[in-house]
Image: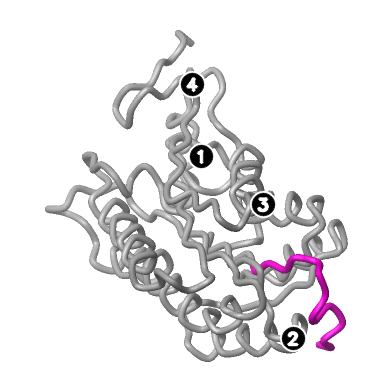
Amino acid sequence: MSSDVARTSTPTAVVTGASSGIGAATVRRLRAEGFHVLAVARRADRLEALAAETGAAVLTADLTHGDDVARLRDAVQDRFGGDLTALVNNAGGAFGTDTVEHGKVEDWQRMFDVNVLATLRVTQALLPALRTGRGGDVLVMSSTAARIVYEGGGGYTAAKHAEAAIAETLRLELAGDPVRVLEVAPGMVKTEEFSLNRTGGDSARADAVYAGVKEPLVAEDIADVVAWMLTRPRHVNVDLLVVRPLAQAAQHKVVREKQ
């Protein structure tokens, strides 16, 4: 890659988990806001389609692997001249709905790898680029699951609690630096893959999650929130923004219409 957008006044962003759902919607929205975006995900075909649609730069990478994170760091240097405005740590996911008693260790490991350790690796790698110039933003896409637990969600809520702890601790540790640390905690968001992945591809179980919910959030709603947070004046730090659909008053309180 060439440093074709380095040292300009145009904001720059890295969005992880960009091949679908909230990540892809965030890439689209930030491009519409005038950001140069580097979209990162594992699936090259989806990234190529997103690049053709939006003009975003793309990098195929598995952020649970240190070598791929190093390639991302180098790509930011090459494309943006090492001057990064925003890192959107969106990569994540839930796998399995077992109880703690019967939870599969491999599911828990996968959730911690992608939600927690990938966020840690990428943030560590890109902090130097975020400190340059006027400073930048680390945005962590957590979940309402980072605030409260529920049956069948032990592994996911544990991972999201840990991811939120990264954001909260980092904000304290970077006090005085020109880096904002922001956290978005979405509630019920209907995307094409989240619940399907969680249920191991069982479409009936995945659809049941949203059954009767008049208007669950969609990926574009969260992308709108992300864009708003990243474009606030530099002295404004939105520590935590919890966003749910109107039908979800709390984690366990969801209004469902009769089917």
**Mark 3 or mark 2: whose residue is earlier in sequence:** 2
Helix, strand or loop at mark 2: loop
Q: Is residue 40 above or below residue 223?
A: below
Pointer 3 local density, CA inside 10 Å: few below 14, some 14–19, many at least 20: few
Q: Position of residue 117 (x, y in %)?
A: 38, 74
Which residue in the structure is indicated by mark 1? 203
How far is disc 4 from disc 2 in space, using C-alphas? 42 Å
Q: Is residue 59 above or below residue 25?
A: below
**Mark 4 or mark 2: whose residue is earlier in sequence:** 2
Q: Position of residue 234 (x, y in %)?
A: 60, 58
Q: Is residue 22 above or below residue 74?
A: above
Please report the bounds of the magenta region as a residue range.
1-14
| Image position of 192 (left or right of 12) | left
Which residue in the structure is indicated by mark 3? 231
Q: Which circle marks residue 59 in the picture?
A: none
How far is disc 3 from disc 2 in space, using C-alphas? 21 Å
Helix, strand or loop at mark 1: helix
How far is disc 1 from disc 2 in space, using C-alphas? 44 Å
Q: Is residue 158 visible?
A: yes
The label nearer to you, 1 versus 2, is 2
Q: Is residue 107 visible?
A: no
Helix, strand or loop at mark 3: loop
Q: Amino acid at mark 4?
A: Leu
Pointer 4 local density, CA inside 10 Å: few below 14, some 14–19, many at least 20: some
How far is disc 3 from disc 1 in space, using C-alphas? 37 Å
Q: Position of residue 166 (x, y in %)?
A: 35, 66
**Mark 1 or mark 2: whose residue is earlier in sequence:** 2
Q: Amino acid at mark 1?
A: Ser
Whether the residues at callouts 4 and 2 have beta carbons within 8 Å, the answer is no
Which residue in the structure is indicated by mark 4? 246
Q: Position of residue 229 (x, y in %)?
A: 59, 49
